Amino acid sequence: MNRQLDILFVCPDSSFQAYQALSKDFSAIEPPTWALLLAQSCRAKGFGVGLLDCTAERLSVEASVKRIAEANPRLVCLVVYGQNPNSGTTNMIGATALCRALKQQHPDYPICFVGSHTSALPGEVLALDCVDLVLLNEGVYALHNLLRTDLRGDLAKVKGIGYKRDGVPVLNPPERVVPQEQMDVDLPGYAWDLLPYRERPLDLYRAHFWHAEYDHGKRTPFAAIYTSLGCKFKCDFCMINIVNRVDNTSGVVSNASPNMRFWSPGFIAGEFDKLAKLGVKTIRIADEMFFLNKNYYEPLLHTLHERNYGFRMWSYSRIDTVRPAYLDLFKRAGIGWLALGIEAASQVIRREVSKGSFEEVNIRQVVKTIRDSGINIGANYIFGFPDDTLQTMQLTLDLALELNTEMANMYPCQALPGSPLYNTTKANGWTLPDSYAGYAFLSYESQPLRTKHCTAAEVLGFRDEAWRKYYTRAAYLNLVERKFGVDERKNVEAMSRIRLRRKLLGDSPPENSR
């Protein structure tokens, strides 16, 4: 007789609400990195583990509930992260819809939430009628200890969880996160074999369109992998480090735990070996600050270069952490793109939201140096910081147009739960979104932060027009054609014809034709 599954990790689907019509063909479908890490960690401790990725399989709520019941786990754990931790709140859209349906049809299944939004607002998540348990940070040790119980008694003894006692939410004392010296042992890689696929591993996942050089054929199979966790910086608009929290005090934000931890380069090289054997070529290095600590990235990149797997990879870097001497190594190892956090053209605004930690650099020179090395650039810009005006946002757009990088992300600034900006917004009495979808950058309900000088509608309208202008210019389209090809230019033109609908700007809701 088969043993009952101890835990089923479930990744809910919020893609249409988050990306609208872009979700059909253009947005990425990323492997659920944190679900894979938690699954492998639990499996290494002897627990029976399963994984259900509702996004990759395009499952409806009804189909998802059916699959969960068929798995019949002791514990259902909804892993609520986004394609980056900053979008974890967005995935609460699908998580809450699935949770309610599951609890209604199968009330005896204990349901647990873990993820960046849960770490930011554990009390609010636990207060939801359908949620029985929450994990208070990344949840590794709390989850191990929770699974050693009967999930009903002894809950008061499990650090790092929240639960309901006679219907009343209770948060236990916090549990530690995995320390540096235990990373290879207690977070021992990824449960790649648990992912669904159609014909070959990871073929239900697709890379960001630009990562594949705007060629749909290069987008799958696709994997994302961390070589480190966390970030040492304390930017006001970011909530990434909230999953490191070991303080249950109300109002704690991400900059209270700017903790970075690394797996050993040799251990991570082994994970890349596994992906190569699975036939994966297109890989995102998901670290928030990969291009930061040479003691970790240098030996790993040398290994990848020596093994010559032919990977197509990208990684993040702040504009002020790029080290020109290492760009050739990045290129030889297979990193063809760097995503640069430029954020704003105004040095004053940029330093204000990064707590003064942003070093003064010549942005134009850094971009030129990267391009001269043969690496493409995805530049990240944010419109609507608290001190932004229409004029300073225009300066940021002008800089983006001048740099004309191979890709440009343009975000409206959001006061994300867990970020310092969230608390500032509440203290100022400014309006926060009234739904999870309101925190999604590309959603119909998107409601960005107002500034001291602009309304939320002005910020959102400026962002959308800036994106349209950037991607429809002849200078940009000619760049795409010259670097990637005529068909790729046509693909970009097709993408730019999809118009996002915005409630804040008076549009009617989009139709889900996926």
Image (cartoon, rainbow, N blue to C red):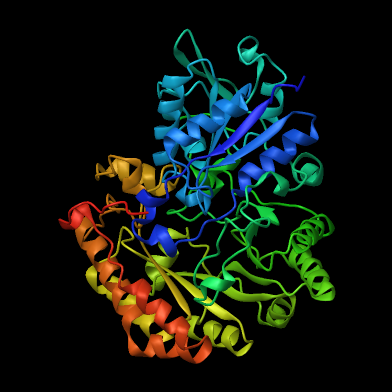
- Identify the residue at horizontal 52%, vertical 36% (top origin): 119
Residue 495, position as x, y percentages in the image: 37, 72
Q: Name the one closer to the observer, 169 or 128.
A: 128
Quadrant in the rendering for residue 315: bottom right
- Identify the residue at horizontal 36%, vertical 53% (top origin): 414
- Identify the residue at horizontal 23%, vertical 70% (top origin): 390
Is any part of residue 251 visible from this angle?
Answer: no
Q: Name the one closer to the observer, 97 or 452.
A: 97
Image vertical order of residue 3 relative to residue 11, above or below? above
Q: How many marks?
A: 0
Q: Is residue 297 left or right of residue 136?
A: right
Residue 169, position as x, y percentages in the image: 46, 17
> Quick one: which residue is furthest to the left in this view?
506
Q: Name the one closer to the observer, 58 or 154.
A: 58
Is any part of residue 317 visible from this angle?
Answer: yes
Image vertical order of residue 73 relative to residue 137, above or below? above
- Identify the residue at horizontal 77%, vertical 19% (top origin): 1
Residue 103, position as x, y percentages in the image: 45, 22
Residue 327, position as x, y percentages in the image: 68, 80
Quadrant the C terminus occupies: bottom left
Quadrant in the rendering for residue 325: bottom right
Image vertical order of residue 420 relative to residue 29, above or below? above
